[in-house]
Structure formats: structure tokens, C-alpha cells
Amino acid sequence: MSKITTNDPVEIRAILDLPVWAVVGLSGNPARPAYDVSGWLAAHGRRIVPINQQAARVHGETGYATLSDVPFPIDVVDIFRRSEEAGAHVDEAIAAEAKAVWLQLGVIDEAAAQRARDAGLLVAMDTCPKIEAPRIGWPAA
């Protein structure tokens, strides 16, 4: 089976330029990668929407238990969950009419990536915005 996601620089830039990021698995634990990456995104002007079972506030933003609880449009669903759990979150992103899904480092679900692409979403998989941004020169100077 060939890899569906190529993490093309043009597509990565298009995703990074989107303003509202729901971060699935984001908690207030500063030792977790989701906390660090979402803080970096916020520092680059992205609105962060924490998605966690406790609906806890993180980075000063209101948290929600699920994507379907978010009362406004989401552009990117950034998934910090195990690969076997990612597909359900991709399906929620499709249902929420997100524009893109980002599966973090080590999060790989080719079938879910294909469903997202088939639904017209941009897809990044098995990578991180903090890695991709300098690689593609984002944000532009």
C-alpha cells in the first residue's frame, strides 16, 4: 500500500495559514507535546481550541469535550492521539466541515487520511507544525 500523505510543502503551508486549530488531546500539562505545539501555534497567531474529555481551559481558551461541542467553525483538527484512535477524530473533523486534519508525529492512519482527502480536506500526517514550519520557511518574513 502506498503512502497517501506526502506532506507536500504547498499543502503544509496552506494548512499552517488556517487560523482556527482544534487540538484533540490537548490538556493543561506543560510536559505533553500537545501543550508545547499548541502554545507555539498560538504564538504564531492561531486560535487554539482545546478538545479534551474534561473540557478544560488551556492557554486561556475554552475547552470542549468533543469537536461536535464547538459552537463555531474549525479550520484544522490537530490530532494528538494514538494512531488507532485517530480515525474517529478524522471522521469528526469531516463531520464538522473542517478544512484540514493534522495527524501528529507517530500518528498514522492511511485509511482515515484517504477519507479526509476524499471529503476535500487537506491532510498532514506523521509530522509536526514546529518541524514543518522552518522546513518550508513559514511564516514568510
Image (tube, rainbow, N blue to C red):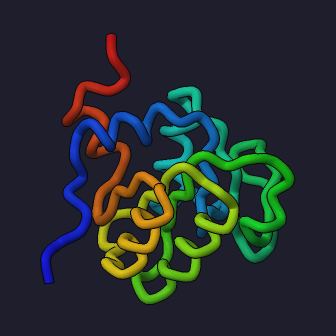
Q: Residue at x 36, y 81 (%)?
A: 111
What residue sits 80% from the left and 63% below the top? 64
In the image, residue 141 sits, relative to residue 97, either above or below, namely above
Q: Quadrant of the N terminus?
A: bottom left
- Relative placement, left or right, of 40 versus 127 is right
Q: Is residue 98 left or right of residue 130?
A: right
Name, please, the residue furthest toward the left.
2
At x 78%, y 71%, the residue is 65
Q: Nearer the viewer, residue 87 or 27?
A: 87
Seen as rendered, the residue at the extreme top is 141
Residue plotted at (67% across, 68% down) = 95
Q: In which quadrant will I find the C terminus?
A: top left
Residue 90 to residue 13: above or below: below
- Rendered location of residue 67, percent (x, y): 72, 65
Left or right: where does residue 77 sit relative to residue 53?
left
Residue 53: where, in percent of width, then height?
75, 76
Task: List the single residue furthest toward the bottom.
Answer: 84
Q: Quadrant of residue 70?
A: bottom right
Residue 30, position as x, y percentages in the image? 56, 56
Q: How many marks?
A: 0
When the figure is inspected, residue 61 is found, relative to residue 50, above or below; the finding is above
Q: Quadrant of residue 137?
A: top left
